[in-house]
Amino acid sequence: MNWGIATAADIALPIKGSIVSGPFGSNISSKYFVEEGIPVIRGNNLSTDMTRFIDNGFVFITEDKAKEFHNCEAREEDLIFTAAGTLGQVGIIPKECKYETYIISNKQLRLRCDKTKVIPLFAFYWFSSPKMVRYIISRNTGSSIPLINLSILKSLPIPLPPLSVQKRIVDILRAYDDLIDNNNRRITLLEESMRLLYREWFVRLRFPGHERVHIVDGQPDGWERTKLKNVTSYINRGISPKYGDSEDRWVVNQKCIREGKLNTILARQHISDYGVDKRINFGDVLVNSTGMGTLGRVAQVHEELVNYTVDSHITIVRPNEKVECDYFGIFLLGLQSYFDQMGTGSTGQTELSRDNIANADFILPTTGLQKEFGSFVSTQRYLIQNLLLQNKKLIEARDLLLPRLMSGAISM
């Protein structure tokens, strides 16, 4: 079906400032950040996997400072693109967003749509589709740092069917996303129940039989205060992969680790050789170890992955026989802020060293208590993995359907 092809410039609101770049870098640097105020959108709030918007993890500037950047404001239904760094990241400010106004960073671009021509969510689905992510990446004009500019954004193509057809396409794709979102909410509740149990037993020390256990200096009898290196069998970075088509070799990158979970959909095929130690095992904890914004993120592997490894920006932390898998994983999730603070190096090149990870303090309860905790949370773990698998299948189905809808191959 021939709907005609427009550009991002064609669908922008016909007023000055409908397509803008963020402030000059030095004008919105970390020295202006405050504890609360107007949130600044950065790369960690966007993704390349069609997640609409990650409405947390912000830095803030004051309202007075934000007034200096009124042209760089973002509000509901605005589209945001990464301009420097991880190209292909696209987001849309949701109608139910946490804040009335946001400011885009110096590494973002913002598109405000003309709703008489395009439904903003339709534009988001198109620009965030795998095909367009690859196209945006191909328009890179940078060398050491990937870049796109306003001219490239304005020239991005988009099919433009009638609004009634756009609405039907959006309704179909949103139905998939609503199921995914519902599963994510269930996952969040299950994860919170595990964290609450962990805090009750191992922080508040209200574990089963605590009334009969002697506590000295805040530590129960039989518990040990040690270092992380003493409860691990392996702590090391991954490989520098040679990417290429391979049916059975996958490498996990830092984008795969978010909100305490591992998303293997974003793993890439590679053709590199590597030792058996660098193969991801069930129970391994993966720690993002390079850069800002993602440094220190933690996820535990709760599935059997065949021929998966990690790249050199991630550290594999593997538990040994002294510690139970579930306790080990949740304890390390609690170290995320510590890992972030332990990063060293210049801005943008921050590194979390193997030694800093290895020398983190670790509390080792009795083996019996760890096993009892594991038996309680195993059901939640099983349910979470099933929900994650459902989401993976929903995402694959949506991503197969999207190009057929957008091309008119399926009659609307």
Image: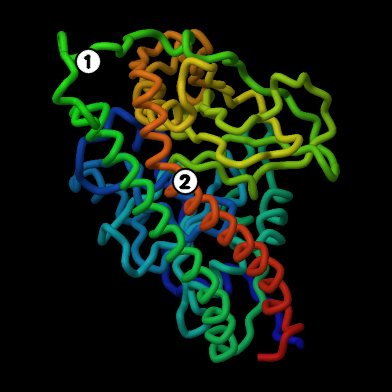
- Decide: is 36 above or below 75: above
Q: Residue at x 51, y 18 (%)?
A: 351
- Decide: is 216 above or below 212: above
Residue under numbered circle 2 = 381
Q: Residue at x 48, y 57 (%)?
A: 80
Mark 1 and 2 residues: CB-CB less than 8 Å, in contact?
A: no
Amino acid type at circle 1 is Pro
To which quarter of the image does residue 154 belong?
bottom right
Q: Position of residue 340 (x, y in %)?
A: 40, 24
Residue under numbered circle 1 = 220
Q: Position of residue 68 (x, y in %)?
A: 27, 47
Residue 35 is left or right of residue 366, and the answer is left
Q: Position of residue 67 (x, y in %)?
A: 24, 51
- Quarter holding the N terminus? bottom right
Residue 405 is left or right of residue 64, and the answer is right
Q: Position of residue 359 (x, y in %)?
A: 43, 8
Q: Residue at x 47, y 77 (%)?
A: 114
Which disc, if any, is residue 389? Answer: none
Q: Secondary structure at mark 2?
A: helix
Residue 332 is left or right of residue 400, and the answer is left
State how the image is colored.
Answer: rainbow
Depth check, front residue: 207 or 291: 207
| Residue 224 appears in view | yes
Q: Secondary structure at mark 1?
A: strand
Depth check, front residue: 155 or 279: 279
Q: Residue at x 61, y 62 (%)?
A: 395
Amino acid type at circle 2 is Arg
